Amino acid sequence: MRTKSLKKNKINVVTLGCSKNVYDSEILMGQLKANNKEVVHEEEGNIVVINTCGFINNAKEESVNTILEYLQKKEEGEVDKVFVTGCLSERYKPDLEKEIPDVDQYFGTTELPNLLKALGADYKHELIGERLTTTPKNYAYLKIAEGCDRPCSFCAIPLMRGKHKSTPIEAIVIEAEKLAANGVKELILIAQDLTYYGLDLYKKRNLAELLEALVKVEGVEWIRLHYAFPTGFPMDVLDVMNREPKICNYLDIPLQHISDSILKSMRRGTTQEKTTKLLKEFRVKVPNMTIRTTLIVGYPGETEEDYQKLKDWVIDMRFERLGCFTYSHEENTHAYNLEDDVPQEVKQERANEIMEIQSQISWELNQEKIGKEFKVVIDRKEGDYFVGRTEFDSPDVDNEVLIDATKTYLKTGEFANVKITEAADFDLYAEVV
C-alpha cells in the first residue's frame, strides 16, 4: 500500500507542444505563485500538472506517454496527484477519462479557474501579464490572440482553442512592460494567426498598430513575428518592420503547400500565383527579410505531380528557413472525410527530400555570411561555446551562432557584435568584433 508523501506540496508543471502552450503554462505558474504555492517547471514535485498537445499523431503520443509515465510515478508513491490540461485534454476528455481513469482530473484549454481550484488556488483576475517565464531570461513569448477562425481542412486547432479572440493592445503593452522590467529583451509575438489580430476588437486588422505601441516599450530590443497567414496579410506591417529597427526582419508564415489543387482542398483561400506574388512583395518591401515557412507533404490526394510542383517551388523560392511535416489524418477535421491515401513511407520520403533540399539552400545562404558582421543575442553556454542568434533566427528552430568560449567571455542574455568565420548548413561560427 502506498503512503501519501509527507513533504510540503510542490506543484510541477510539465509543458508539451508549442510556444502557445509554454505561454499558458507560464500564466498558470504565475497564478500559483500569486497564491503562495510552491511551483516548479519540469522538476520534481509531488503534484504534477501536464499541459498536453493534441495537434498531430506524434504530439498526441508524446502527451499520452507523459501521462502514463507520471501515473507510474504515482503508483510508486513518488507523486501524489496528476492533473492533465491543454489541447489533448480539451479534444479527447471523455475518451481520456475512460481510457486513463487514474488521472485525478482533466481540464480543457479554457478551464484555468477550475484547474487552479483543484490545486487549492484562486484565479486572480487582477493579474495582467504576471507570469513565471520558463524561457532563457532574454526572450519571452507574448500571446496576442487565442483561437482561430480559419477553415483549414487539416487543422484541429479551432476544435481545441475555439474562435479567434484578440487581446486588447493596452493589456499586451502592460504585459510587455512587465517582461522588460524582468530583463526580457526579445518579444516573440505568437497567436494561431497574427494577421487576424484586431478584427474582432477593432473591426480591422490591427497588427501594425500593436507593433507601433510595442516598439515604445523601454528595454525591449527585438520584436519577432511568428505564425502569420498568407491570405489577407496586412501589408502595413511591412512598413512598420522597415521603419522600426526593433522589429526583426523576420516572418514566420506557414504556407503548407503550393499546388493549386492541394491548396484548394486544404481550404487555404489562395493559389500558387497569389502566394508567390505575396512573397515577392515581401522581398521588395523588406529587402533583407528572412522568411520561415512550414510545409505539409502527403496530404490526401497529393500526386507525384503535386509533390514535384512543391519541390520545384522550394528550389525556386530559396526560403531562408523551412520545416516540413508529414500529413496527420485528424478526426473531426474537414480533411478527415478524404481518404488518407499517401502511404506513410512515401510521406516520409517526401519530407526527407524537401529537408535535404532546404539544408543545401541553407548551407549556400550561410556561406554568403562569412566575413560579415552581425548583432547576436547570447542564449546560453554549451560545452566550449556560447550559443547566440541573429535577428534572422528564432530560438529552437533556426540557425545558431557558435562563439568559442575558451577565447571570449560573454554574458548570457546580452548582445554582442560578431563576425562570421565559418558556416555549416544550420550553424554559424563567429568571433567577437
Image (cartoon, grey):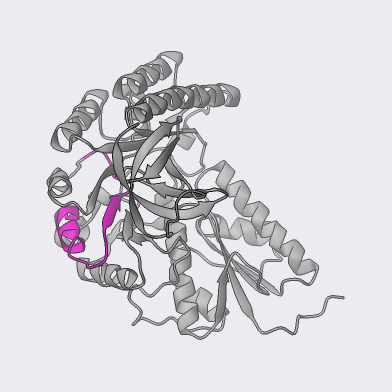
Q: Is residue 139 magenta?
A: no
Q: In the rendered image, which quarter is residue 303 located in?
A: top left
209 lies above or below 401: below
Residues rendered magenta in the picture: 203-231
Q: In the rendered image, which quarter is residue 31 located in?
A: bottom left
Q: In the rendered image, which quarter is residue 324 located in?
A: top left
Residue 294 in view, yes or no: no
63 lies above or below 33: above
Query: Which residue is pictured at 14% across the width and 37% down the height?
Result: 285
Q: Foreground residue, 393 or 28?
A: 393
Q: Foreground residue, 411 or 332?
A: 411
- Is residue 189 rendered to the left or right of residue 40? left
Query: Which residue is pictured at 21% across the width and 62% down the height?
Result: 214
Horizontal and vertical percent position of residue 388: 41, 49
Q: Foreground residue, 417 or 309?
A: 417
Name the outermost residue toward the front. Answer: 407
Horizontal and vertical percent position of residue 152: 36, 40
